Every structure is written in structure tokens, then in C-alpha cells.
Image (cartoon, rainbow, N blue to C red):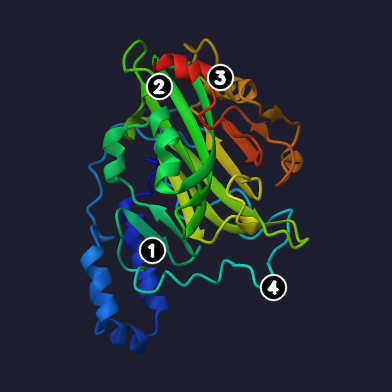
Amino acid sequence: TAKAPANANTQAQSTNQAATTVPATDKAADDTTTTRKTLASLFTKKATTTAPAATTTAAPAPTTAKNTKSTTKKGETTTKKGETTTAASNSGGNQTPDNFKVVEGMSDSSIVSYMYDPDGKFFYVEDNPWQRKFGFNLFYDWASPLLQLHYDTWRAKFTYDNLEWMIQGWKGQYGFIFIGSEVGVYTREPGKGYGTHYECADDNHLLYMGMSFYQNFGDGKGYVKLFERPYGAHWWTTGFVEGHVTDYKFNDRSCFCMEARITTYAPKATDTLPMQTLFANALREIGFTEVASKNQLIPGGTDAFWLSGETDVYLMWTHLDQGNSSTTERIKIG
């Protein structure tokens, strides 16, 4: 799948943090091993990649208009780290957030556009990956099982500010090693583009987003939060950890749950309907239920969303899966 950034300065900061968490003796030894050299040969992009040039427009902050810049720092979220309505930890032989074996030798570089956050202990896709050049369409979801990508997905589509928008979510098993979730933002000019294809949102159309990922291990402890992706401006926000679908039931991803906060643009006098309203209507159309308070968003419960102020949309998603079964989508691509 193709989807989400975090700025390059943040990645470099994560790299420096990772370096301080590895004992000097272990790192020195690792540098001399054949494994280290083999991994290094696969690295395609360092975390110190130069950030893209600044644009004249920034993603919307929670209470500001589209053209207002924000200085949200990495790690800022609407709730304190670790706050959740579910179990705080996992026991037994299941994988846990502290059980990641694949991170050795990877915390100071990216492999095929992937970066590692040593604080949150998750992988994510860097700011401007190669996937951004190719946009997204329904065919990618259809073909995903061939690449051992077994996920649920939803697509919320609406037209706002002379653009057709698609905000899409994913959660599931990514290959044989990773599990995780994603939210992507895509746009296209009305009447242009082919079928279900959208372009990845450019830097003038980023949205502020934050995301948490949960798993129910089937041990009676409910849904456990495995990571939290900090709130920030993205076209594609992602997070992955080592793990597998509960009981290896790849056709049932309801053991996974995504919680997200997505901030739309502030209402303008020229709007027929605010962007928040249009997004909410699109979520209703695909099966989400609006609730009256954030406390009603429960991991494993009803797929639902809550509107806060004039711009924020909070959602909790466990069960819904549009997959590739939409008759409308099939007609559009012939």
C-alpha cells in the first residue's frame, strides 16, 4: 500500500534518540558484525534526508484556518501517553510492545522508506517516500493479498474546495512480520483522473492526524494499545510493530483496532458545507455511527466517530471492512 509522512527533522531527531538508547559497547560490536554490514547494504535512505522545501500553505491546526502554520511538536497528543480505556499491558507468551526482535541494527537508518521511533517502539514511513509518486486506487487493495498484506480498509469520499477527497484507513497484517495501521489522504481535480485513482495529497493539502493501534490477544484483557503515532501534519500516517493476527486467523482482523484524530480545515464563508461535515457524512455512508461524546469511542465496540469543535473528527474502528467488494467501485474501473 502507499500512504503517509512525518517530517524529516522529526526523523533525524528519532535517529539521534535511538542512538542514545543503545549501549556504546553493543553498538561498537554490532558495527563489526557481518549482520550489520548485510543490513547496511539494504538501507536505501538515511534518516538525515534533507526535508522538502517549505510550501506556502500548511495543514490545518485544530482551531485555525487552512493557511495557518502550526508548530505542533512530535509527541503532542490530546491525551496523556498511556491513557486508554483498555488493559495497559499484556501477559503470557503473546507478543508485546517490548518484544520487538527485528529492531536491532535498524534504529539508525531506514529500509525501503521505513523509519523506527525508539520512544514509541514502532516503525513508520518517512516523509516523502517513493510510494507518494504513484497515488492510490482500488487495484492496490485488490492485489494486496498477493503480497501477503491482509488488512481491513475503509474509504471516505467527498468533494471540498474544488477537489475530490478520499481519506482511507487500513489495519491488519503486513507480511509475515508486522501488524499495524495507516490513514492516507488523497485528492484529485473533479472530472479528472481515471476510475478509482487518486493522487497522494501534496504539501498544500496535508491534514493534522494522530493514530493509536490496539490488539486483542484473546487472553481476557481486552484491547491493548501497542503504539501511538503522534499528532502532526501528514498525507499518510503509519505505524507498524512486530506481531501477528491473533490465533493466526488472517481472515478476521477484528482483533485489531485503530483510534484516530483527523483535523479538517476550518470553515470558510464561501463553504457550502464545512469540511468536517462533509467528512462526517462520508463516514456515515460507509457504516460509521456518530456518538455524542468521546467516551463512547471504545476499542472493540461499535465503529463510530465523534465531532469536536468545528474541525476535529475522532474515530474508533474495529469491524468495518470495505475490502474490494464495493459494486460502485467495480463499475467505476470498468
In this rendering, position of residue 193 left or right of residue 237: left
Q: Is residue 34 above or below residue 125?
A: below
State which quarter of the image contains the N terminus. Answer: top left
* Amino acid type, callout 2: Thr
Q: Are marks 4 and 2 in contact (CB under 8 Å)?
A: no
Identify the residue shown where x is 51% and y is 16%.
328
Tell me which label, 2 or 3, sits earlier in the chain: 2
Q: Give the label on residue 196, or none.
A: 2
- Looking at the rendered image, the disc whose residue lies closer to the viewer, 3 or 4, is 4
Determine the CA span between mark 2 and mark 3. 19 Å
Badge 1 or badge 3: first in the primary sequence: 1
Circle 1: element type = helix
Q: Earlier in the sequence, mark 1 or mark 2?
A: 1
Q: Which residue is mark 3?
A: 278
Q: Quadrant of residue 102?
A: bottom left
Mark 4 or mark 2: name the one nearer the start of the chain: 4
The CA span between labels 1 and 2 is 36 Å
N-term-proximal mark, 3 vs 4: 4
Q: Quadrant of the C terminus?
A: top left
Between label 1 and label 2, give the one nearer the viewer.
2
Task: Looking at this view, name the residue that lies furthest to the right.
Answer: 220
Which of 168/33 is in front? Answer: 33
Task: Name the amino acid, label 1.
Answer: Ser
- For label 1, the residue is 14
